[in-house]
């Protein structure tokens, strides 16, 4: 599923649409955010976290690795693995402690094993002044969600 995101507002609206399509209880969902530097991964994560009810800033987790948010639909963990050099370092992250929430992961390719645990993988790429988004389902419920989003699109 490919979507053109001509400006930042489009990325924000796209994140809000995904949140609407996700189940009320967000715990356990893992969403990978791929894309080169500046592709809009944090913009997407920030928009989703804000739409889920967080008020205030959404700082980059580049140095903290994880920023947690306790929200009405459950916990959201915003994870940024940019600074992870090898998978060994991931042991310090305490990944299993994030099981009770929804995980939004920037730079997931730093931890190749994550792909098997993911539900959705978003890839953002540069497209002129804007961006292109491509979603892939990584689990059966992730694929079902994308089908529901696509059929909602064709009804618009
Ligand atoms: N669809 C879009 N079109 C044009 N600009 C966008 C779009 N989405 C986000 N941006 C802009 O791109 C810039 C970088 O965004 P952002 O910080 O979200 O990227 P990132 O992928 O998280 O980068 P990093 O790899 O450094 O973490 C911001 O200035 C943001 O406003
Ligand atoms: Mg970022």
Image: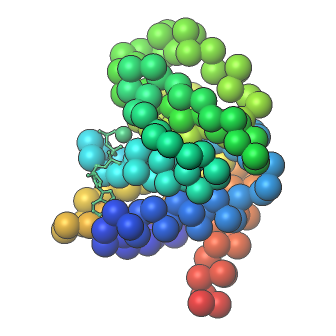
Q: How is the image coloured?
A: rainbow
Q: Is residue 143 above or below residue 4?
A: above
Is 109 left or right of 153, judged from the image as shown? left
Residue 62 vertical placement versus 136 (above, below): above
Q: Where does the C terminus fall, quadrant-wise? A: bottom right
**98 on left or right of 1:** right
Q: Residue at x 56, y 46 (%)?
A: 55
Measured as percent of width and height from the top left, residue 105 is found at 51, 37
Rendering coords of residue 28 (x, y %): 75, 39
**Residue situated furthest front in the rendering:** 56
Residue 66 appears anywhere in the view: yes
In x, y percent, where is residue 11?
Answer: 42, 63
Left or right: residue 77 compared with residue 107:
right
Q: Quadrant of residue 75?
A: top right
Quadrant of the image where one finds ligand 2: top left
Look at 34% across and 63% down and name the residue there. Answer: 8
Comparing 141 with 93, the one in front is 93
**Residue 54 drawn above or below residue 64:** below
Q: Nearer the viewer, residue 116 or 90?
A: 90
Q: Residue furthest left?
A: 128
Q: Residue at x 47, y 39 (%)?
A: 58
Task: Answer whether residue 118 is visible to the viewer in this image.
Answer: no
**Residue 64 occupies which quadrant of the picture?**
top left
Numbered circles on residues, count: 0
Q: Residue at x 64, y 50 (%)?
A: 53
């Amino acid at each position: 599923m490919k979507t053109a995101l001509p400006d930042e507002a489009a990325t924000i609206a796209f994140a809000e649409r995904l949140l609407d399509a996700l189940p009320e209880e967000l715990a356990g969902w893992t969403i990978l955010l791929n894309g080169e530097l500046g592709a809009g991964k944090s913009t997407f994560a920030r928009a989703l976290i804000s739409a889920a009810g967080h008020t205030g800033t959404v700082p980059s987790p580049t140095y903290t690795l994880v920023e947690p948010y306790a929200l009405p639909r459950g916990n959201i963990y915003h994870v940024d693995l940019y600074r992870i050099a090898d998978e060994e370092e991931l042991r310090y992250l305490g990944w299993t402690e994030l099981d009770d929430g929804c995980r939004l992961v920037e730079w997931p390719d730093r931890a190749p094993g994550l792909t098997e645990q993911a539900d959705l993988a978003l890839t953002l790429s540069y497209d002129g002044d804007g961006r292109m988004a491509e979603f892939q389902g990584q689990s059966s419920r992730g694929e079902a969600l994308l089908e529901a989003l696509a059929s909602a699109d064709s009804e618009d």
